[in-house]
Image (cartoon, rainbow, N blue to C red):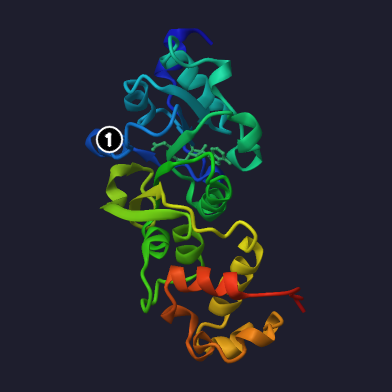
Amino acid sequence: MNNTEAKRLKIRAKKHLGQHFLTDENIARKIVESLGSSGYDQILEIGPGTGVLTKYLLEKNQKLFLSEIDVESIDFLKVNFPENINENTFVGDFLKINIDEKFAEQIAVIGNFPYNISSQILFKIVESFQKIPEMVGMFQKEVAQRIAAVPRNKDYGILSVLVQAYYDVEYLFTVSENVFNPPPKVKSGVIKLTRNVKNGLENNEEIFKKIVKAGFNQRRKKLSNALKIIDIPENLKSHPFMDCRAEELSVEDFINFAKLWKGETKIF
Ligand code: SAH
């Protein structure tokens, strides 16, 4: 394929890859501008597709890496941005990269994420929080709302607590389905994550996640019941939190609770 052919190439959106190409340049620019300008040395864009965000990211003069699995999009980007994008720019399937090994320096993450795997993408980002100080990402609106939700709200759940323990979350704006080709069935929401101060969970991360998951898996029940699935240590059986439902606890409450949790826990 020569350059002229590739530039003319119309990429056919592939449903199984979650491809919906953003067609509104102002929104693309706004998403890229939402990324802060310090605290990281390089940027990783997940799912660049035909590069609607990528071209604005290139203006930032930071080292840019791209994670894309669609070979047609990869060819398109290499041909259309020959000075900036080549084989070495690509890091492969996001769900398969080892972020800590791949990137030595702090890296910001951005993307209009494929919705079918957006929660997996998010959890992977949170797992690598020590490398990722910031993320700006587009999700399906309901998911974005759940990530940003506050206690005593129906959207507040596992996603909210596990993310907010590591990042401050800002819901930036909603995006209509009409600015994509092809249009998705749902609206989208753009959120920004900014790594927050240390939560001190180093030795309690595992139990923290177990408490959050067990608590919200039976969200109508008080924690004294919902947490029976994990062995509740004696010192916490009469803790006031046991009388609450998971959605009544703040992220800090969950963190403190996990820190108080002592001894071995068994999952049945
Ligand atoms: N950023 C573009 C495309 C968004 S669509 C735009 O806004 O127009 C989502 C993109 O994610 C697609 O290009 C799809 O090929 C890519 N993608 C899907 N699964 C992926 C994965 N596991 N890793 C990296 N990219 C992926």
Quadrant of residue 26 within the rendered picture? top left
Residue drawn at x 47%, y 21% as measured from the top left: 76
Locate residue 229, reporting x and y percent.
Answer: 69, 82
Residue 12 seen in render = no
Using residue 112 as the reference point, say whether residue 75 is left or right of it.
right
* 132 horizontally vs 54: left or right: right
Query: Does the image show residue 61?
Result: yes
Secondary element under disc 1, as helix, strand or loop, is helix
From the viewer's perspective, is 233 left or right of 75? right
Is residue 207 shown above or below 65? below
In the rendered image, which quarter is residue 174 located in?
A: bottom left
In this view, 194 is above or below 67: below
Q: Which residue is mark 1?
A: 33
Category of crowding for the residue at label 1, using alpha-carbon neighbours closer than 10 angstroms: few (below 14), some (14–19), many (at least 20): some
- Name the residue rendered at 46%, 27% in the picture: 42
- Say if 5 sits above or below 111 in the image: above
Q: Position of residue 200 (x, y in %)?
A: 54, 58
The outermost residue toward the left is: 26
Quarter of the N terminus within the rendering: top right
Q: Amino acid at mark 1?
A: Glu
Looking at the picture, tell me which residue is in the foreground, 62 or 1.
62
Position of residue 211 relative to residue 83, above or below, is below
Q: Could you tell me residue 46's position as x and y percent?
A: 49, 37
Q: How many marks?
A: 1
Quadrant, the C terminus: bottom right
Label 1, ligand 1: CB separation under 8 Å: no
Residue shown at 48% from the left, 55% from the top: 166
Where in the figure is residue 175, as x and y percent of width and height? 28, 50
